[in-house]
Amino acid sequence: MAGSGTAHLRSGESVLRVEDLSVEFKTSAGTVQAVSGISFDVLPGETLGIVGESGCGKSTTGRAVLRLESIAGGTVSFRGDDITKADRQTLRNLRRRMQMIFQDPVGSLNPRRKVRDLVTEGLAISGAPKEDRAASAVSVMNSVGLDPDFFADRLPRALSGGQAQRVAIGRALAMRPELVVCDEAVSALDVSVQAQIINLIEDIKEEFALTVIFIAHDLGVVRTVSDRVMVLYLGKVCEFGEPEAVYSSPAHPYTRALLDSVPQAEVVGGFSGPALSGDVPSPLSPPSGCRFRGRCPRAEARCAEEEPQMRQVESGQYVACHFPLTPVGA
């Protein structure tokens, strides 16, 4: 594999290919390095789960690949076309094929518009005829489990959190996208409602032949929905692989610590050292070498001097660590 943090781990045509992506934010205190040179790809029909602590760069990555954040470095290719510097018209055309479902379902909806208009908002912006929008509203509302006769004339304030998220999902589906980014799409919902929305996402993925990026901090949810999992820490990829491998035998100490923090997590292996402690370092001034070294029980001098490169530890499982829990080539 080429480059630092690279995670191009399968062959075949990618829906999305990200190369050395970097995203920075200018603040009064300095430059925040939100995402620092990460690479990955997503194949047709798969769900890539992205997990990590708050502030690790999950949501920024999701927004950046849709060009909702400015890209400081690297490239993003959609169906083989580099969209990193695409002009406004090109991006507008891409919006039909790349959609996002946001964390706050109610906040993402215009409070003055009815459900029938909300789910076809993108179609209206793209200039679709009124009759086409009306037909699409009925179709997508049925697809997301909202009875058009009951919900079409409702305003967002009359909806529950789960119903509002169904509207947001319907709005994305109305565009008939190829790629959908779910940014913490269930984290603001009650546990029982989360299960319903997760099942809905699984159903529409199959019905609409979608490719999905699923961003969440809940490791259990990510394991349930993902074909592959990418673990981020302070803007860097630290582990990447199929859920069964990553969850049953994590190779990176950070992944191990995340799993140890989940009550009754069904995982095995790993180190017997102390649980994850300390705070995430400031992205204004990331540590040298391995960014996790200040919280890692396995850290040695090399970890401060040299940034670890992504390498394979098992078939389909990769880690960026000098001293992985699973030996390289095991």
Image (cartoon, grey):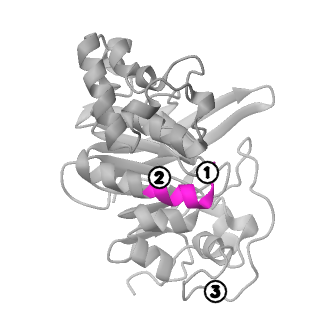
Q: Main secondary structure of the magenta part?
A: helix
The N terminus sits in image quarter: bottom left
Query: In 3D space, how far apart are the residues under numbered discs 1 and 3 (Cα atoms)?
Result: 34 Å
CA separation in Å, label 3 and label 2: 35 Å
Q: Which residue is mark 2?
A: 197
| Residue behind mark 3 | 271
> Which picture quadrant has residue 157?
top right
Q: Is residue 5 visible?
A: no
Q: Where does the magenta region start and end? A: 188-198
Question: Amino acid under label 3?
Answer: Phe
Decide: few, some or many residues near mark 3? Use Cα within 10 Å; few <14, some 14-19, many ≥20. Answer: some
First reached walking from the N terminus: tag 3 or tag 2: 2
Position above or below: 40 against 307? above
- Of labels 1 and 3, earlier in sequence is 1
Residue 31, quarter of the rendered image: top right
| Residue 244 on the magenta segment | no
| Residue appearing at x 60%, y 41% in the figure | 160
Label placed on residue 189: 1
User: CA separation, marks 1 and 2?
Assistant: 9 Å
Of the two numbered discs 3 and 2 in the rendering, the one whose residue sits closer to the viewer? 2
**Which residue occupies 73% across, 41% down?**
284
Q: Secondary structure at mark 2?
A: helix
